[in-house]
């Protein structure tokens, strides 16, 4: 009996131990899901001199189309996005008033012509009589004055007729250049004033790639500088470009400087309004002066980067974690998928991005968001953000992922 009790106690203890093991295994925390991506050096930043900015395609020349007189808009012949040619009629005003004004001016000119003919006949008669001393001198002078007034009146009426005829023509709006309609600003039946915008016209031909550069980057941008442009709508293609113009003054609202690039061979596939990115390469050294300037700029960049002339990395500002006063990023170790807090040197802070030097290497994965919800040594499962644009091997971040 005593042996049976011992066997029962032993079985019970084993059962409790096995149950405890199962509970411990069930309580093991799964890897935390974090939003992370590999980082790569900015293109052409070995010396820290390249500049990358978002760009937009715009026509080099454009203008607002408007009537030169006021009136009621009775017809529009083109719509937004239509192609127009020079001299093509695009809209008309009600010409009734202008036609009446032109008819009135014509009648005034006819009356002035008759008055001039009569004044000329009277002057000829008075001259003949004055030669025979049949009329007084003051009467001849009065006749001469009447003739001069009639001549001036005829000239004035002729000029008013030209103005009236021009106003009649101004009821028709024609394109001054070949191009595309980029905006519609008035509707049929609307009464428009002189100079009021009716259409926007972008001229065909040369196009510019526009970017807005920060003041801190102006020293690295020069007219004639080479650049490479890529567009989101044209994946796998790149276009050579050069800086054509740099605005002399900053925009009063954004405090940025408008920079215009010219594409070497834009092609028909590059359309107005396309967006993309431009990388402005460092200026090639040619001559002692340019070489010295490039050397000085490079030295300044190295000094600003904390004494490192290596590549720079542009990351979202949400990836920066401050350990006291030291900026750092969370790096996912490739060996065991655990987190390591890596101090970095910040070269510059942007509105949404931060440029880093030192501390990270090409291809390493860093946490992009939720940096204050993780800890060193934590086992994690990195997933790509929905906006990464890369093939999502692990799928989108599930609910509850660190953001």
Image (cartoon, helix red, strand yellow):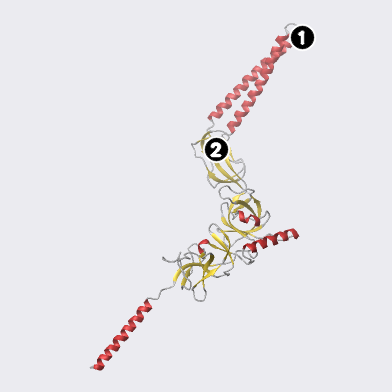
- When the figure is inspected, residue 109 is found, relative to residue 225, above or below; the finding is above
Please identify the quadrant where the N terminus is shown: bottom left
Q: Secondary structure at mark 2?
A: loop
Point out residue 337 in the picture as x, y percentages from the top left corner. 49, 74
Q: Is residue 8 visible?
A: yes
Q: Nearer the viewer, residue 305 or 30?
A: 305
Residue at x-position 64% and y-position 23%: 156
- Residue 48 point in image, percent of width and height: 63, 63
- Extreme residue toward the right, this view: 131
Up the image or down, 80 lies above or below 4; here it is: above
Q: How many marks?
A: 2
| Comes first in the chain, label 1 or label 2 | 1
Q: Is residue 287 visible?
A: no
Which residue is denoted by mark 2 in the rendering? 196
Query: Which tag is nearer the camera, tag 1 or tag 2?
Result: 2
Give residue 64's position: percent from left, percent from top.
58, 42
Name the residue at the front extreme: 324
Residue on which disc 1 sits = 131
- Disc 1 crowd, CA 10 A, few/some/many (<14, 14-19, 20+): few
The reply, left or right, for residue 328 in relation to residue 135 is left
The vertical placement of 71 against 318, above or below, is above
Residue lying at 76% horizontally and 9% vertically, measured from the top left: 131
Q: CA distance from mark 1 to mark 2?
A: 62 Å
Which of the 4 image quarters holds residue 28? Answer: bottom left
Residue 54 numbered tag: none
Q: Quadrant of residue 146?
A: top right
Assign a secondary structure to mark 1. helix
Q: Residue at x 60, y 24 (%)?
A: 106
């Amino acid at each position: 009996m005593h042996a049976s009790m011992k066997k029962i106690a032993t079985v019970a203890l084993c059962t409790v131990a096995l149950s405890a093991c199962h509970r411990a295994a069930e309580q093991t925390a799964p890897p935390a899901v974090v939003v992370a991506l590999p980082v790569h050096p900015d293109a052409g930043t070995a010396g820290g001199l390249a500049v990358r900015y978002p760009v937009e395609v715009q026509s080099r020349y454009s203008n607002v189309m408007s009537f030169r007189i006021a009136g009621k808009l009775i017809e529009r012949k083109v719509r937004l996005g239509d192609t127009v040619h020079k001299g093509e009629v695009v809209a008309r005003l009600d010409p009734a008033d202008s036609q009446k004004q032109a008819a009135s001016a014509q009648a005034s000119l006819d009356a002035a012509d008759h008055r001039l003919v009569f004044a000329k006949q009277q002057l000829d008669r008075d001259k003949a009589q004055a030669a025979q001393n049949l009329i007084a001198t003051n009467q001849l002078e009065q006749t001469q004055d009447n003739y001069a007034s009639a001549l001036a009146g005829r000239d004035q009426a002729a000029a008013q007729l030209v103005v009236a005829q021009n106003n009649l023509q101004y009821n028709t709006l024609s394109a001054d250049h070949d191009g595309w309609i980029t905006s519609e600003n008035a509707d049929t039946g609307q009464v428009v004033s002189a100079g009021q915008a009716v259409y926007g016209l972008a001229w065909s031909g040369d196009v510019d790639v526009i970017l807005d550069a920060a003041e801190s980057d102006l020293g690295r941008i020069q007219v004639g500088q080479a650049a490479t442009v890529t567009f989101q709508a044209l994946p796998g293609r790149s276009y050579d470009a050069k800086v054509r113009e740099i605005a002399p003054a900053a925009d009063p609202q954004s405090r940025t400087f408008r920079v215009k690039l010219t594409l070497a061979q834009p092609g028909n596939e590059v359309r107005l309004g396309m967006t993309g990115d431009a990388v402005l390469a460092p200026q090639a050294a040619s001559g002692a002066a340019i070489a010295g300037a490039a050397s000085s700029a490079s030295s300044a960049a190295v000094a600003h980067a904390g004494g490192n002339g290596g590549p720079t990395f542009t990351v979202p500002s949400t990836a920066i974690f401050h350990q006291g006063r030291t900026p750092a990023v969370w790096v996912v170790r490739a060996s065991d998928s655990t987190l390591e807090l890596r101090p970095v040197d910040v070269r510059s802070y942007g509105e949404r991005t931060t440029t880093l030097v030192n501390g990270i290497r090409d291809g390493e994965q860093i946490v992009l968001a939720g940096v204050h919800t993780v800890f060193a040594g934590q086992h994690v499962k990195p997933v790509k953000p929905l906006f990464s644009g890369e093939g999502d091997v692990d799928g989108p971040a599930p609910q509850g992922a660190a953001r």
